């Protein structure tokens, strides 16, 4: 993330997981698959699970997760954004929070998600 004072407009994949809104920088996403109990998002360095994949936001302002958030969160975070009035925790793809740890079976038990599952812009390359 660069930009003024560490704030930048980023392309972010939005997810809903366990009732919360999360984001992953689009550049870190390799592919998304749909399984029996939700989605698996394959990252450059592993994978995470999600209940829903909502789509891609092209220019989401992401602030560094330092100061108070880093102090009280307890896990490494990639950043923080606000979508409308809703906070979005942007996952650090190299160290996702424990809430995302994959618990589903082998890769063969999932099928690739269709474009309609992913929302707008997901099929395009950055």
Image (cartoon, rainbow, N blue to C red):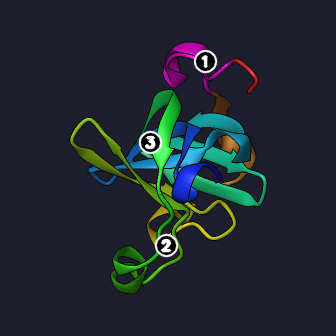
User: With 114 as the anchor, is 87 left or right in this view?
Assistant: left
The reply, left or right, for residue 111 in relation to residue 88 is right
Number of residues whose C-alpha sits closer than 10 Å to that of mark 1, classed few (under 14), some (14–19) or many (20 or more):
few
Q: What stretch of residues is rendered in magenta?
A: 113-123
How packed mark 2 is, by other alpha carbons closer than 10 Å (few <14, some 14-19, many 20 or more), is few
In the depicted structure, whether residue 103 falls above or below residue 31 = below
Label 3 packing within 10 angstroms: few (<14), some (14-19), many (20+): many
Task: Please say whether residue 46 is visible from this viewpoint.
Answer: yes
**Of helix, strand and loop, which one carries label 1?**
loop
Q: Which residue is mark 2?
A: 98
SS for callout 3: strand
Q: Which mark is residue 114?
A: 1
Pointer 3 residue: 15
Asked whether the viewer can see residue 104, the reply is no
Q: Quadrant of residue 35?
A: top right
Residue 16, given in percent of the width and then of the height, sits at 37, 44
Disc 2, SS = helix
Q: Is residue 91 magenta?
A: no
**Residue 126 percent location from the top left of the image:** 74, 27
Give the image location of residue 43, x and y in percent: 71, 51
Residue at the front extreme, as displayed = 4
């Amino acid at each position: 993330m660069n930009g003024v004072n560490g704030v930048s407009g980023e392309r972010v994949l939005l997810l809903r997981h366990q009732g919360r809104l999360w984001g992953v920088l689009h550049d870190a996403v390799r592919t998304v698959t749909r399984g029996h109990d939700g989605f698996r998002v394959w990252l450059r360095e592993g994978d995470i699970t999600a209940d829903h994949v909502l789509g891609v936001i092209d220019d989401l302002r992401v602030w560094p997760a330092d100061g108070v958030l880093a102090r009280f969160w307890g896990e490494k975070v990639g950043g923080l954004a606000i979508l409308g009035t809703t906070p979005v925790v942007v996952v650090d793809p190299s160290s996702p929070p424990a809430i995302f740890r994959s618990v589903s079976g082998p890769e063969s038990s999932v099928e690739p998600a269709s474009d309609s599952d992913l929302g707008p812009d997901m099929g395009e390359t950055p």
